Image (cartoon, rainbow, N blue to C red):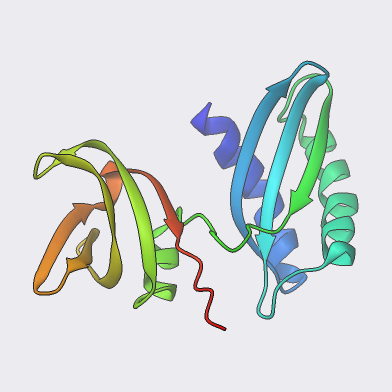
Amino acid sequence: MNEIYEDIRRVAEPAIEALGMELIKVEIATKHKGRILRLYIDKEGGINLDDCVTISRQINPMLDVENILKGSYTIEVSSPGLDRPLTREKDFIKYKGESIKIETKESIENRKNFQGEIVDIKDKILVLKIEEGKTAEIPLFLIMKARLIPDFKL
């Protein structure tokens, strides 16, 4: 299944970047009405409905030509939301200083769930400030899910 995600990213990412946007995440879901391909996109200042429509209209025919997803599917393009997923090393670098939640594949220091501020990335290891004076070092390959924690300052 990872190969399918990589193939979709290979086809979609250059076209999305050419329009000044970034492909954040690719998801495939199975629903009672069939498969749904979800593309989460973003750009500086955020995206709007027109951006989603543009990407959908551009990417859908490209994926059909490549025939990556055999059979029928529906494509959905949307914003990653306020609690944006972090999926690549460059995401962690971009959001250095921000608060995040992480779930790991394996226990690190007897825990799988972490919350804290991104301090740094060193040699593919995320350094996370989890409380005053305490950090956790989390290898990127062990991260199953990572999301920004929305900052609702008024």
Query: Residue 67 at x, y = what percent?
Result: 77, 29
Query: Residue 118 at x, y = what percent?
Result: 30, 70
Task: Kindly give the residue lying farthest to the front in the view shown.
Answer: 154
Left or right: where 94 falls relative to 52: left
Identify which residue is drawn at 24% across, 59% down.
Answer: 124
Left or right: where 68 falls relative to 53: left
The quarter of the displayed image where residue 6 is located:
top right
- Please tell me which residue lies in front, 6 or 122: 122
Identify which residue is drawn at 36% across, 75% down.
Answer: 96
Q: Is residue 15 above or below residue 60?
A: below
The quarter of the displayed image where residue 112 is located:
top left
Q: Is residue 141 above or below residue 126?
A: above
Query: Residue 108 at x, y = what percent?
Result: 14, 43
Identify which residue is drawn at 58% across, 37% down.
Answer: 5
Left or right: where 128 falls relative to 83: left
The quadrant the C terminus occupies is: bottom right
Task: Kindly give the residue lying farthest to the top in the view shown.
Answer: 32
Query: Residue 146 at x, y = what percent?
Result: 40, 52
Q: Is residue 1 above or below residue 118?
A: above
Identify which residue is drawn at 17% across, 41% down.
Answer: 111
